[in-house]
Amino acid sequence: MSEYNFTEIENKWQKKWEKSGIFSIDTDKEYDNKFYVLVMFPYPSGKLHMGHVRNYSLGDVVARYKRMKGFNVFHPFGWDSFGLPAENAAISRNIHPREWTLKCIDDMKVQIKGLGVSYNWEHEVATCLEDYYRWNQWLFIKFYEKGLVYKKNAPVNWCSSCNTSLANEQVEDGKCYRCGTEVYQKELEQWFFKITDYAERLLKDIELLDGWPEKVKIMQKNWIGKSIGAEIDFKLEGSSDTIRVFTTRPDTLFGVTYMVIAPEHELTQKLINDSDNKEELQKFCEDVINMDRFARTSDELEKEGKFTGKFAINPVNGEKIPVYIGNYVIASYGTGAVMAVPAHDERDFKFAKKYALPIKVVIQPEENNIKPESMESAFVEPGIMTGSAQFNGKRSDKAIPEVIDWLEKEGFGGKAVNYRLRDWLISRQRYWGTPIPMIKCEKCGMVPEKIENLPIVLPQDAAFDESGVSPLKKDPSFYECICPKCGGKAIRDTDTMDTFVDSSWYFYRYIDPKNQELPFSYEKAVKWFPVDQYIGGVEHAILHLLYSRFFNKVLFDLGLTKSIEPIKNLFTQGMVIKDGAKMSKSKGNVVPPEDIINKYGADTARLFILFAAPPERELEWNDDSVGGCFRFLNRVYRIVDENSKAISSIDENQDVEGKNYIELRQKLHATIKQVSDDIERFHINTAISSLMSLMNNIYDFRENISEDMDDVSKGFLKSVLNTFVKLLSPFCPHIAEELWEMLGNKGFVLEASWPEFNEKYAAGDSDLIIVQINGKLRARLNVPKGMDKESVEKVALAEENVIRNINGKEIRKIIYVPGKILNIVVG
């Protein structure tokens, strides 16, 4: 008996796959049965960890399975290769980011090929190379021409460690998503994409995402955050200025007792300057502005405010209400001002209690009246309107449209829609990213670079230092340029693009990576989009996936694709956890795949990471479990090796009678069905479990038949083992190819057809009957195949759990679906 030499086997088949070009596909062709499998591409840090292995192994299972099912599979790979880590590595190691990144790509490519993943490497892209980021710049200019790009001074989220601004989505619990440093507000001139122009389409088209997890769709809906209500203008007393508010509760307008504006509101500084308490107000605003933006909107935040000394006039009743500056109002949310109704909003109630402000009840419960002095919390439910002029006596939630119509008629305000989503801040004050293709000319103003001058290339002689200031700001050869409009002297923008721009459309570049005329061919986009299956971490549900959907809609409007959404089906795998934290280099808890591959082989690493937990859940790392997967593959290798010489030249045969043959054949076809169904549903761990169970049955069968098998037995065993190897191949491709060859087959197992489930073979000598009482499962019965209804009823009614649930009730009807379900209706 030979040994399972995984190193030799895996090297052998990786070379054969590469030489044959078996994973290649021509994206110029049009296929009736195309299947685009995509995994989220990695940042090339130089080393894989088991979280990467999980993502890529899941994608490879789908790709290999679909190939064997007859699909023409496109399964590309690339590198999300701009970003701060490479720049920080350049500073700390005195090496250029490009050199560092390309070396990391080479190292990681070796690791990934060692896993045996079936990638179309000829379609590889790296976002840090000019032939990719040229098209970032091209798209930026096209967005600009459509009015989707603008620059403005704005308070931004600033990470002092990374020395750059962050989009709202990149701040997690008040900290930088990348390095964990506390983020604070800083005023900068920044470039923005007008994603808010697409808010309604992004929201509405979530309905098209039938193949996405519900939790991801909910997260996107909540982030877009559509609210329907009214905007009302409150005039400042003794001034021509007005404060506009947005509210979803215009039914409470008659109960407003104060107003709160954000420290960043456009009127705040004017109110401070007119105040007798200028210094105190100024310091309060500065302190609040430097607070974490997310903490300011948290329910746990202690609500604080300062009275400006000014009053506004409530337009619906003429009442004077004090105007406060508050820590819980943000200029970028709504209008940056709120009308406070403490009787009917819990946040306003707490603020009013703290500062002894009036509480005015204008919505009463239907069953009883409440008084302000006895309230311990706000009444936020619908009720009967009171103290609200002509709306008294109306149910508040039903009266909202009437109130809005009245506001419009009186000129006080009108219906409005508000979104939580804010425009995408894409400026980054670092070197290692796509240069923004805009130029400032004293004569022409801000103008885009000419398309024919792209790409604007990053200078290769960049000088880095510990300050973290971008070398682009210190390099006259980069920023001194000629205005593309008038030919005069001009200054090039020194900001680079957020790296999420790179990843928002990379899946389109995959289909056409050598195109020098356009980012990708429209004809190819029509053939290959939407992506049939996308696989990646749920942590990208808002950042990457929302931005990708936005980009796709702009690409659609530009006539570059006809796909409304980029992704048809999405699967979000859970993270790999070690020592209670996500596995990552920054956490110092990485398990390098080569540690497992060197000891057990790539197939064992793949099998373990797929089997250890349901793929949608977190996987807690456990070194001890890897050995069990290795032992299983040794068992598989051993039974093929022990029998291959005897059966390799025999023809397959499943039509064999006899108890041992029938039982194994039933198990085999039940496993074919389960593995097929489980792969389709991403129940990968249970698919592997069923293969392990089948292998036990194969061993039992071999022990139960004579040592010297006849040709009929050999043909049957060969058929079973060939089918098993096919089922195993998406999970453990190297050993599967080796066993396929050992069994006397020609070509690759990947070229073989996926096993077909045969219900005739799966059927046994008994039926499993589901017994229900009033539609609820109460028992399962194994009865002889074809048993008549009366006999099935008799057996079912003798079951203890059935007797207990009938409990003397009258049996009104018994419905029997032969061989499947018996439903007893009682009353």
Image: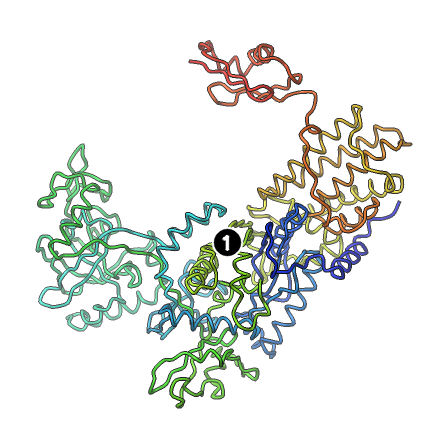
Could you tell me which residue is drawn at 54 percent across and 82 percent down? 459
Position of residue 147 measured from the top left corner of the image (x, y, whole percent): 35, 69
Pointer 1: what residue? 567
Is residue 172 left or right of 349 when viewed as pictured? right
Is residue 756 left or right of 418 when viewed as pictured? right
Specify few, some or many for label 1: CA neighbours under 10 Å numbering under 14, 14-19, or 20 or more: many
- Amino acid carrying mark 1 in the image: Ile
Quadrant location of the N terminus in the rendered image: top right
Position of residue 61 measured from the top left corner of the image (x, y, whole percent): 65, 49
Residue 494 location, quadrant: bottom left
Position of residue 286 measured from the top left corner of the image (x, y, whole percent): 29, 69
Q: Nearer the viewer, residue 417 or 606?
A: 417
Determine the secondary structure under disc 1. Answer: loop
Could you tell me which residue is drawn at 76 percent across and 61 percent down? 19
* Farthest-out residue, bottom: 488
Q: Nearer the viewer, residue 348 or 62?
A: 62
